[in-house]
Image (cartoon, helix red, strand yellow):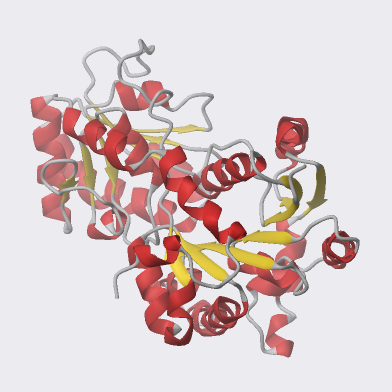
Amino acid sequence: MNEGLLFLAHRIPFPPNKGDKIRSFHLLRHLSARHAIHLGAFVDDPGDWQYADALRPYCASIKLLPLKPRRARLASLSGLLTGEALTLPYYRSRELRRWAADLAGSGTVTRGLAFSSAMAQFMPATLSRRVLDMVDVDSDKWSQYAPTQRWPMSRLYAREGRRLAAWEAQVAQDFDATLLVSEAEAALLQRRVPQARHKIGAFENGVDADYFSPARDYPDPYPPGVPGVVFTGAMDYWPNVDAVSWFAERIFPAIRQAVPAAQFTIVGSRPTEAVLALARQPGVVVTGGVPDVRPYLAHAACAVAPLRIARGIQNKVLEAMAMARPVVVTAQAAEGLRAEAGRDFLLAQDEAGLADAVTAQLQARTTNAQARACILARYDWARNLSMIDALFDATSAASPVMETCPA
């Protein structure tokens, strides 16, 4: 019988329709083939409660707890008194801690995986193997946020960057292995925590290339004769909001001058007021959540990822590449991407460069078969996930996956 594995996630790992849930679901499904999974996770979207049954085929038991963002934000302020990162009390739960401790104390679970650094606080120290999928070095994201904000938020974000970095360093030393989404992210953490560098590695995301296939017929969501530029992503996530606002306001007008029929379509759930307001601009469309993003990718002249703040791998870029779409990205969105600029994707940093690159794609209306070939060769879930199996079988801190990061 498979041994029990405690899997803790900061958000229910289903449906796999946004960055962290895509990675956590595929990781959960992979591990369930070799372990009896006991899943503990928070639900921060009331609409996600319906998906509990979809996870049962992969789990021996499931513990889901509600997380109300407004209440959690207030709770996080206790970190100002305790001196800890605000991220930790945001997710704090005595109930989840007791549930995890009971499973470990009874011997039901002997190994554990925490998905995101915040969940490390619930992982019992008595387990024989503890692995942390940190995904991104989130502290660096908060540090990037700080100079973009006014006081007092600039100071609060800078503080969070420092305090969360200290927590990340602590858990990287405490856990048997820490994983990141790319070698670039892993190298960053290794530089910050050199005493734990031998325990820090990476496994990259994958793409379901059969699902994101350009070979299928998709209904065209764009008006006839309209060359589409598309951005996909969760539209309540601040880096995405910043990206589309910058593109729509500062870059797209120049594109419309060159290609008057061009349409910039922003596809993603829970658009903020700032995103919804962009639809007042000529040629900008905000869809909100859609049942299937593939038609918007399949019929777009190009996809864009004009991110100015980013960490890790951008699934939106991988999915567009899998659909053989030309993708125009900034350097931040390309970080950690194992692909060749100019062949698999187009790199442009400033406003003029982005406008010129997108305009050229709207006029050319070509596909990019090389982008899909790159995905097939390098971003296969089964192959990438197989690297972590040794982490739960090994008897020492060293393992093959730890050797993937450059010195």
* Residue 232: quarter of image: top left
In the shown orientation, is residue 47 left or right of residue 334? right
Nearest the viewer among 115 and 235 is 115
Q: Is residue 257 above or below residue 397?
A: above
Q: Is residue 123 above or below residue 333?
A: below
* Residue 117: quarter of image: bottom right
Position of residue 183 measured from the top left corner of the image (x, y, whole percent): 34, 63
Position of residue 5 measured from the top left corner of the image (x, y, whole percent): 72, 53
Q: Residue at x 48, y 65 (%)?
A: 399
Quarter of the image with the C terminus in it:
bottom left
Nearest the viewer among 282 and 388 is 388
Q: Is residue 273 above or below residue 135?
A: above
Quarter of the image with the N terminus in it:
top right
Q: Is residue 186 above or below residue 99?
A: below
Position of residue 222 measured from the top left corner of the image (x, y, whole percent): 33, 19
Residue 380 visible in the snapshot:
yes
Nearest the viewer among 130 and 147 is 130
In the shown orientation, is residue 343 left or right of residue 118? left
Total labels: the figure holds: 0
Position of residue 303 measured from the top left corner of the image (x, y, whole percent): 27, 36
Residue 368 visible in the snapshot:
no
Q: Residue at x 35, y 10 (%)?
A: 217
Nearest the viewer among 173 and 240 is 173
Q: Residue at x 37, y 25 (%)?
A: 296
